[in-house]
C-alpha cells in the first residue's frame, strides 16, 4: 500500500519518500499499539491504520504542495503526532462495520449528533430525519469495488471527530432543505419573454411528444416489472420480508427496528439469535443500527439479483430493457403496497405483529 500512495510524488523522489516514512514507522506502530490495546475488539489491523495515515500524509503534506515536494521525516513525524489517532482508529473500525466500534461511537457521539441536529433544525420531525440521514451516510449504503462507501472513509484524523461530525450534520441539514425548495408555479412563468412564444409552443409540443413516448415505454414494461417484483419478493425469507416492511412500509428508523429485534416476542428475534450463535459473538441481546443496515443491504441484493434473473430469463429482456424496468420499479410508489401484500399473504406471521413499534 505504501508504494501505491507514494505514486503521488515523482518517481525520482519515491525512494526519499519511502525512506522518510520508514524513519517514522516505529512512532506510527507505537500509536497503533496504544489504540489497539484500548480497543482490541475493534479488529482493525496495523496495515489498515497505517494506510489511512499515509493517505492523510499524501493529502495534506504532498497533494497540497506546489510541485509535490517530498515531506521530510521531521515533517511526517510532526504530522503523525498531531493526528487525532484515537478518533481515526474509531472511525476506521466503524467504516469496516465493526459492531463494537459502533456501540462505542454511539456512547461517545450519539447525544452530540442528536443535540446538534435539534439545535440546527429546531423541529422534532425534521431533526429526527436529519439524525437518521447522518447515520445512514456514516453506515454507507453504496458498495463500490466490494468496499462499503461509508462517510467515515473521508475522515483523516486531521481534526477532531466531533468537529468533522458537526460539518456532516450541517451539510445534511442543508441538503434536507434544498430538497424541499418549492418549484415556481406555472402561472408565475406567464408573461416571461413573450416574444419567444412560437419557440415556446414548439418546445411545448416536443415536450408533449416526449411525455407520450415515455408513457408508451412505461406501459410496455410495467407488467414485466410488476411480475418480476412479485416473484422477487415472494422468494424472500420471513425475516427478510419483515425487514423491508418495517423500513419501507411502516417507515421505522433503523434504531427502532433494532429495538424491535431485541424484544423477546419479536417475530424476527429467533432468527437473529440463530445468526448470532453462528457468528460466535457471545450471547445475542443487543442489536446495533449498523447491523440492521447490513441485513437490509443483503435483502436488497437478493431482490435485485432475482429481479434481474426474472426479467432476463422469463421475460427475455436485454440489459437496456432491464434498466428501464429498474427505473420503473424505483419510481413507482405502489411498490410499498406490493410489499404490504407480500406480507399479508404469508401466514407464518401477521401484519399486527410486524407493525408493532418498540415499546
Image (cartoon, rainbow, N blue to C red):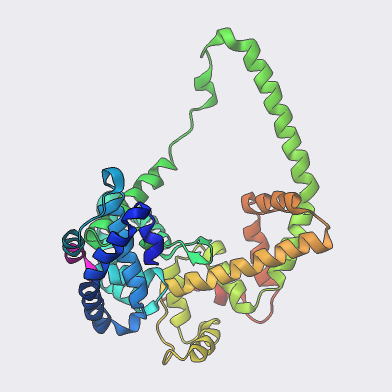
Nearer to the camera, 168 or 30 = 30
Examine the structure image and report whether residue 81 is included in the region drawn in magenta. Answer: yes
Residue 348 appears in the rendering: yes
Estimate the x, y position of residue 82 in percent, counting from the top left. Answer: 17, 63
Estimate the x, y position of residue 333 in percent, counting from the top left. Answer: 62, 52
Which residues are drawn in magenta? 80-86
Instruction: Answer above or below: position of 129 versus 218.
Output: below
Instruction: Answer above or below: position of 178 versus 157.
Output: above
Nearer to the camera, 175 or 253 = 175
Going 41% across and 87% down the picture, which residue do you hit? 285
Q: Is residue 83 left or right of residue 271?
A: left
Residue 122 appears in the rendering: no
Nearer to the camera, 355 or 302 = 302
Q: Is residue 116 left or right of residue 228?
A: left
Going 39% across and 43% down the picture, which residue do you hit? 177
Quarter of the rendering containing residue 241: bottom right
What secondary structure characterizes most of the magenta part? helix
Going 39% across and 68% down the picture, which residue do you hit? 95
Estimate the x, y position of residue 240 in percent, counting from the top left. Answer: 60, 74
Amino acid at each position: 500500500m505504501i508504494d501505491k500512495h507514494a505514486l503521488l510524488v515523482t518517481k525520482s523522489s519515491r525512494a526519499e519518500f519511502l525512506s522518510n516514512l520508514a524513519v517514522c514507522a516505529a512512532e506510527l506502530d507505537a500509536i497503533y499499539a496504544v489504540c489497539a490495546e484500548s480497543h482490541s475488539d475493534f479488529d482493525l489491523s496495523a496495515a489498515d491504520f497505517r494506510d489511512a495515515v499515509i493517505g492523510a500524509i499524501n493529502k495534506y503534506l504532498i497533494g497540497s504542495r506546489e510541485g509535490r515536494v517530498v515531506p521530510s521525516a521531521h515533517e511526517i513525524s510532526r504530522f503523525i503526532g498531531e493526528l487525532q489517532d484515537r478518533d481515526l482508529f474509531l472511525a476506521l473500525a466503524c467504516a469496516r462495520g465493526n459492531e463494537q466500534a459502533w456501540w462505542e461511537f454511539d456512547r461517545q457521539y450519539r447525544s452530540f449528533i442528536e443535540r446538534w441536529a435539534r439545535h440546527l433544525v429546531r423541529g422534532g420531525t425534521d431533526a429526527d430525519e436529519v439524525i437518521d440521514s447522518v447515520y445512514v451516510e456514516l453506515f454507507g449504503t453504496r458498495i463500490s469495488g466490494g468496499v462499503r462507501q461509508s462517510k467515515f472513509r473521508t475522515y483523516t484524523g486531521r481534526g477532531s471527530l466531533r468537529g468533522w461530525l458537526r460539518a456532516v450534520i450541517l451539510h445534511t441539514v442543508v441538503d434536507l432543505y434544498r430538497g424541499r425548495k418549492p418549484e415556481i408555479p406555472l402561472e408565475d412563468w406567464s408573461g416571461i419573454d413573450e416574444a419567444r412564444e412560437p419557440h415556446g409552443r414548439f418546445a411545448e409540443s416536443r415536450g408533449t411528444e416526449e411525455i407520450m413516448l415515455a408513457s408508451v415505454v412505461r406501459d410496455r414494461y410495467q407488467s414485466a416489472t410488476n411480475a418480476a417484483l412479485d416473484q422477487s419478493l415472494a422468494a424472500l425469507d420471513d425475516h427478510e420480508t419483515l425487514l423491508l416492511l418495517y423500513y419501507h412500509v411502516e417507515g421505522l428508523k433503523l434504531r427502532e427496528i433494532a429495538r424491535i429485534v431485541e424484544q423477546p416476542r419479536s417475530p424476527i428475534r429467533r432468527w437473529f439469535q440463530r445468526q448470532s450463535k453462528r457468528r460466535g459473538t457471545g450471547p445475542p441481546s443487543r442489536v446495533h443500527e449498523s447491523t440492521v443496515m447490513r441485513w437490509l443491504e443483503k435483502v436488497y441484493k437478493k431482490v435485485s439479483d432475482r429481479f434481474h434473473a426474472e426479467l432476463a430469463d422469463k421475460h427475455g429482456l436485454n440489459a437496456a430493457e432491464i434498466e428501464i424496468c429498474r427505473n420503473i420499479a424505483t419510481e413507482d410508489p405502489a411498490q410499498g403496497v406490493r410489499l404490504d401484500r407480500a406480507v399479508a399473504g404469508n401466514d407464518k406471521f401477521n401484519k399486527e405483529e410486524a407493525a408493532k413499534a418498540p415499546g
